[in-house]
Amino acid sequence: MSALLTPIGIERPTAIKFGPGLVAEVGAFVRVQGYMRPLVVADPFNAGRVDLLALPGDPAVFGSVRAEPDIANLEALLAMAERVRPDVVIGFGGGSAMDLAKLAAVLPGSGQSIRDVVGPEKVNGRRVALIQVPTTSGTGSEAGARALVTDPATQNKLAVQSRHMLADLAVVDPLLTLTVPAAVTAATGVDALAHCVEAYTSRKAHPLIDIYAIEGIRLVGRFLGRAVRDGGDREARAGLSLASLYGGFCLGPVNTTAGHAVAYPLGTRHHIPHGLACALIFPHVLAFNAPAVVDKTAHVLDALGLSVEGEAAIGAAARTWCEALGIDMRLSQHGVAADDLEIMAGEAHAIRRLLDNNPRDISPAEILAIYHAAL
């Protein structure tokens, strides 16, 4: 059936403000709405610059968000939320902070635990306001309704999706990303790229989302190298912030595919940051899927300034493109051992919510081959 005849729905934050210097709009919104008990959810670095939000009074700050948050990290936040009883929760950081902020806005006082809400639309509701403020350009979590937390018992990610976790306000201020180091800029930029590419080439791809996906790819192709070379390049930072936001738009109605499924065990088992994990896998899945989406893969390559054909050439060119950003693309250099690859392949293959979207069927053996090629 034509994609044009496929029903699709788009849900967005109630309001999105995008532009340099807009971070103080958070405090203005809180004042106008009359909120009195803000709770800021941040990583340690951003916890040290909460003043940029221009919040009234003395806001409560949970500043211990981990790079790959697990259930214990979430429970510590929820315990604080129970004490503070906030009327507005503010995610201030990368995807981890924003994901935990979503859960802190819906779980306390609900009678539901994290395990009760895993899956689509199981959250009962939300009684507090939610604001999201990204400080990296990668996850696009500010735009979406999903949150991911690692279960250390199974070393798998628990995925929660709910319309109740859409922000009342998302403030995307590219100046907040000026402090992001080059290595993190590169990895998170490829994560944003992967969101757009995977949505663009998905079995669920839709023209309504393709327009965001391909423009996000073009923005990364144009600006990521510039931002890595010069972190103070404000135009490049703004371009990446927009690409990340567009990637977030792609995640709700379409979502990611094999790239993210194959990357997840790198984070859950080896604690490789999510953006870097996606970057390490990106060239291999792009090449693997190419025969199933020939024209769209050509569009992706063109947007990245690459002109090659054939799986091997595509994988090599995309890998070289990532290496030019300063990313060491060898799994072995990030603590992944060969004797763990088969277990990882089995875990990745079990992530059907993503693999069922992939344009080409992929077996555990083919996932294992990707890991070996990336090792």
Image (cartoon, rainbow, N blue to C red):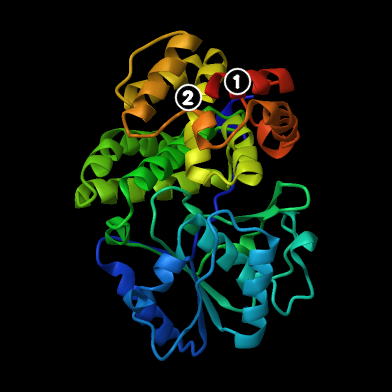
Q: What residue do we see at 33% from left, 21% from top?
A: 302
Q: Is residue 155 left or right of residue 204?
A: right
Name the side, left or right, on which 252 lies relative to 368. Answer: left
Residue occupying the point 72% across, 26% down: 342
**Image location (x, y in percent) of residue 50:** 38, 76
Numbered circle sitting on residue 372: 1
The crowd level at tag 1 (other Cα within 10 Å; few <14, some 14-19, many 20+) is some
The answer, for residue 356, to whether it is visible in the render is no
**Mark number for residue 94?**
none
Q: Secondary structure at mark 2?
A: helix
Q: Secondary structure at mark 1?
A: helix
Location of the C terminus (image quadrant): top right
Report the quarter where the N terminus lies. Answer: top right
Of the residues shown, which amino acid type is indicated by label 2?
Pro
Tell me if residue 245 comes above or below residue 371 in the rendering.
Answer: below
At 40% from the left and 86% from the top, the residue drawn is 31
Residue 274 at x, y = what percent? Answer: 53, 45
Q: Where does label 2 land, which residue?
A: 283
| Image position of 279 with respect to 90: above or below | above
- Lateral position of residue 160 relative to residue 281, left or right: right
